[in-house]
Amino acid sequence: MTRTENTPTDSPGAPGAPGAPQGDDGPKPAPLPRHGAHLPSAPKLSLTQFVDLDTLQEIQDSFTAVTGLTAKIHDPDGKQITVPTDADQRRASDLVLEQLIAADADDAGRFSAPIAVEGQILGSISLEPKPADVASPGQDELREVMDSLGIPLDKTDELAAAAELHCGPNKAAGIQFLYVLANSIARLCFDEYHAQQRVQELSALYEVSKALSAERDLQQILDTATHAVADVMKAKAVAIRLTKEDDPHKLEPRAIYNLSQNYLDTGAINFDDSEMLREAMSGKPVYIRDMSTDPRVIFPGDAKAEGLASMFCLGIMHQGKAIGTIHLFSGEPRSFSPFEVRLVTAIAQMLGTAIQNARLDTQRTQSRRVLRQLHLAANVQRRMLPGEMPRLPPYDLAARYVPSFELGGDFYDVIDLDGHIGIAIGDVVGKGIAASLLMASVRASLRAYAQDVYDLDEIISRVNNALTRDTLDNEFATLWYGVFDPDTLRLTYCNAGHDPPMLLREGTIHTLETGGMIVGVQHDTEYEKGLFDMAPGDTLLLYTDGLVDSFNAAGEKFGRKRIEHALIESADKSASDTINHILWQVRRFTGPRQGVDDTTLVVVKVDG
């Protein structure tokens, strides 16, 4: 039982205490705090926080009965917290109790009170019988007084016996006090026992956490954990199983300590098929004393071959979800105390956090690696686009590419054709790496055939055949390609399933739709080429579907009508300003929402 004492000389600043201000005339009081300053106040303790009131009452009553002195127990403020002992009632009950407990003495007349903690006897405290030839203290003096009073000798022994009965030690109260002392000693031992367990638990957790925190790799964490747990728990062997990422109902062995390779070779186990693993994964500790006979053991033969006797299994949890199991094995039959169960539970929780952190760290590393590759690929993709539009009077050219992701499937290109100029715009299905690779393939094919073939319909047909040879059914692209003649202002083009470009002439919108189906779907598809004679003041807008499919907060599309309206508003603007105006109208319409698709615009304006 712990006792807290507030001794004035132990308090900083008390007279005579170390650190108290001293003067010529002796100790001086400590200086008062400045006005408004706050001193930290310790929590006020109470005796009943450490000893229950019934025990205090029993100590007081037993002490009074044994000594005949009046005892009281008070709180720190001097208020009595026990009720006064009724000496007469206590004496009467002790006389009755003495008759009842007479049979509890052993053959030698000894009474013994055991001192036990957690059901284990630590010792005892006994009340020894008085030897028959030893007189009680004071009997010799009593006989001398009776002799001086002339009391007959035959009456002396009778009076001494009566005095012994009424004035001698209270045997019943002594036995009760004996048990009070035994219980108090047991409580002190119990508190010390649990304090030692807490120290052991904290020390073990510290050692395990120190070992786990030194590792970042998941496998190293698991290997370190098996060694650390085996050392802390004095286990013969330790194994860890984790759920598979592709099948969370299966547990696969990931780390072992002091087990053969055969354990790792057992492979994944569906825990739904095992009562033991189901219980462990539900958060319940599983204890098996004899692995050779318990029907819950999955591989009893392997356990015998490994020299395993008992097992303790517990689920490894993270945020209430089981992610694996930890198994502790002993070579001899062994029981696990409540303290050991709590310790393994705490280690399993710590291990669950470490495992999850390692997995997240691995994912972050992989994500950074992928992101770096995406940055590199995006830089390559940007370099495929024309750095700046060429100057080819009377044409005023401008282009803009607005990706929705790091990599996209939109592209545009400008090809120098010995005095003529070829302009292409395309959109590959999908987004990301696959779309960017397909886009590069379409661009490379178009550039290759555009240099050697004159007829545009033949160029697009060859691009289509090349794409169908190397792609799957769900991989295709839309493509528009046109060749501009600066001398005659004639435009020759072919549209392979792309959004028809808009040509603005004197307030009227014309669309350029002649061509055929998308490329990459059907081999040997035939395409047509279209002709359009441009005139000074004409504005041609090429775009991808990201412009049309820009949504606002209400879920409305920007749509072709708004594109036409923005294009008409830009009739007197340069090619670059036309693009800026259209994109500004899109931003006003969508607000700060991120576009869901890449957006590409190319404007060809014929100077007036």
Image: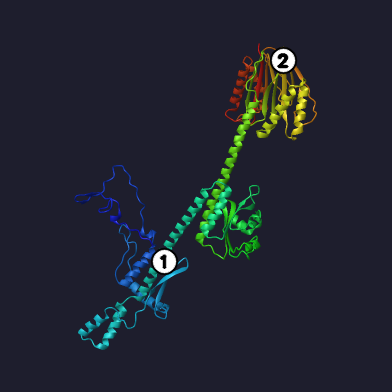
Q: Position of residue 178 (x, y in %)?
A: 38, 71
What amino acid is at disc 2? Asp
Mark 1 or 2: the one toward you: 2
Report the front residue among 284 and 374.
374
> Mark 1 near mark 2, Cβ–Cβ under 8 Å?
no
With 526 as the anchor, is 539 left or right in this view? left
With 429 as the anchor, is 577 left or right in this view? left
Which callout, 1 or 2, points at the residue further toward the start of the chain? 1
Q: Disc 2 marks which residue?
A: 485
Residue shown at the point (66%, 34%) measured from the top left: 433
Q: Disc 1 marks which residue?
A: 186
The quadrant of the image that shows the C terminus is top right
Q: Give the SS element for disc 2.
A: loop
Q: Quadrant of residue 329?
A: bottom right
Residue shown at the point (74%, 21%) measured from the top left: 451
Q: Position of residue 191 (x, y in %)?
A: 42, 61
Q: Which mark is residue 437?
A: none
